[in-house]
Image: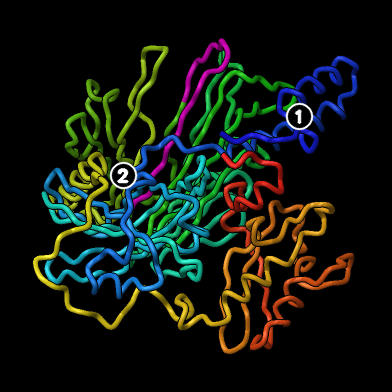
Amino acid sequence: MRSFIANARTDSVEQKLRLFEAAYRAGDRKLAMSLLDSAKDTLAFEESSQTHAAAVASPADHFTPVKNLPSTWAQWAGGWTYCKALDLFEIVGIDRQAEPADFWIAAPHAHTTDLGRELRVAAVDAKSGRLVEVPCQVDQLSRVGDDVHVQVTILANVPAHRHASYLVFYGNPLAERTCYQTGLATRGEGYALTIENEHFVAQLSSQVGQLERLTSKRQHGLELYAGGKGHGEPPGIDWAHDYVDEGGFQKLRMRNWPRCLNYETLRGPLCTSIRRWGIPYSPVHPLFTPARVHMEQGYRFFAGQPYFIKEGTIRVIQDVTVEAMRDDEWVFSGYSFTDLLWIDAYGKLHEGEVPADKQEELWGVGFFHRVSRDAFVALRLEHSASGFDGLTHGGAPTLQYAEYEDKAGRARMEQLRHRLMNPLEIRAAEIPRLAGTASSTSARLARFGETADSARLKPAIWKALRQVRDEQLYSIDANVVDMGYVYDVREEHGTAYVLVSMPHRGRPMYQFLVTAGGGRIEPGIRERLLEIDGIRDVVVEMTWEPPWSVARLSDAGRKAMGFDSK
């Protein structure tokens, strides 16, 4: 649990709501609005700091010192101190190649400096016994007591009805942020993103983050969009979520938002995801602002995959009469397709019109073009409701946009749905036994600058950075390393490269940390590092990805900020 030793520096949500109620009763609406904004900031902080609810595939006490690995493996992983073994099992008879696989691991905080920077994953080649590094993505860093939890994504290769072994390495303070080239590119800021992989380009609305366009990278270059005026809101190919209130008076939509009310994004080399949530808006907002239904929607895009995942929930929070409700609908302009596709309750794909007795039991809907063989299909994986009857299956789909070729295309789509319904099973394992001694390989896990023999100046750089304070915290010894502001350090030919962040976008002028002057009294990053013998120049860059969180505080930083060590 997270707790403050002293409450003099902040106020709880409960206290802010009490102040809000008093201000509202006194008729001070401006103060009331400001207090609600402040309470929302506290809630956002608590949301970003909360412990994840997913099961941990490898607990903190499940690890092996690298020095205890077979000698060729230990030599290959030189520079790293600990590793975890995981087995991935394929259980339904589908050969998995570059399959996105997510898992959570925990590590003792004392074993790591920054899991986002130092974690690496290697596949064990079952035939040769060699270790082969595979691209990985680390997200959602959180501190749980004395442990650190992170979500790891890899693209796994597992033969049908077999298993594959992977090793996760951590514990290298000299490690640098990786830059894997996977073909997934994400451009834009916030939720106004354009996501591209080898199969398509997806564009999200700059106003509200809804999926606006999807362009195939096949030879036809088919572009899916929804033109026209819509209902006054920005057009998009994804029209959900919304509902119609009592008497059919009005439709309340997420797409009516003038901007995303709440959102979170994760972007990396293997997966980019965005989650948005809030109360839908009336067409005459703020004349009518009912808070009766809460909606949440998310997209996940992957490297190398011709599909993306859409997830959504609609939750009733007050008694409300709903005439109609929609959580899934796709609208395209033009003449992209000529024929219908649908999937029945048994996972079988059909062409043509849906029979009347099947229309409320669909587990996939889509279209194809009989000449070009382009297709768009929403494969519905899970759709459920509680508290009322009458649910029809039209929710949270996975979409495949690929070539559809009669029987071959039909089999591919059916298998894709079967594959996604049965993800790989991931379990903690013991270090694999080798049939023989694995042959040595020239490639190593460490890049240049990630081991003691190739990073002579890096310990001095980190030490010097611990002398740089955030002077806006006047009376606290809060240096930029213990505060978690420093994301990466590299040194090449006498030039130190430092990547930094700040806790929030209200302080984008990171140069305040770099040099003295402009209100700064003490030496900054540049002056401190130029004092090191061998450093001739310093380059400091700024990033907002991933966003800073309280989990980045070291134990010393937590103590300085008044946090309980747990």
Kind of residue at disc 1: Leu
Queried whether the magenta region covers residue 310, the answer comes back as yes
Q: Closer to the observer: label 1 or label 2?
A: 1
Looking at the picture, which amino acid does disc 2 mark? Val
Q: Using the image as rendered, state which of residue 258 and residue 97 is in the foreground.
A: 97
Question: Within the magenta stretch, is there residue 234?
Answer: no
Magenta segment, prevailing SS (helix, strand or loop) = strand
Q: Looking at the rendered structure, which numbered label has been put on residue 377?
A: 2
Label 2 packing within 10 angstroms: few (<14), some (14-19), many (20+): many
Residue 331: image location, x then y, percent: 44, 41
Helix, strand or loop for disc 2: strand
So how many labels did they put on this image? 2
Q: Quadrant of residue 135?
A: bottom left
**Please, which residue is most extreme toward the left here?**
435
Tell me the quarter of the picture where residue 288 sits.
Answer: top right
Secondary structure beneath label 1: helix
Of the image marks 1 and 2, the number of the one nearer the N terminus: 1
Q: Quadrant of the N terminus?
A: top right
Indicate the quadrant containing the C terminus: top left, top right, bottom left or bottom right: top right
| Left or right for 137, reference 436 | right
| Relative height, residue 167 to residue 565 (above, below) | below
Start and end of the magenta stretch?
307-325
Nearer to us in this view, 188 or 99: 99
Residue occupied by mark 1: 36
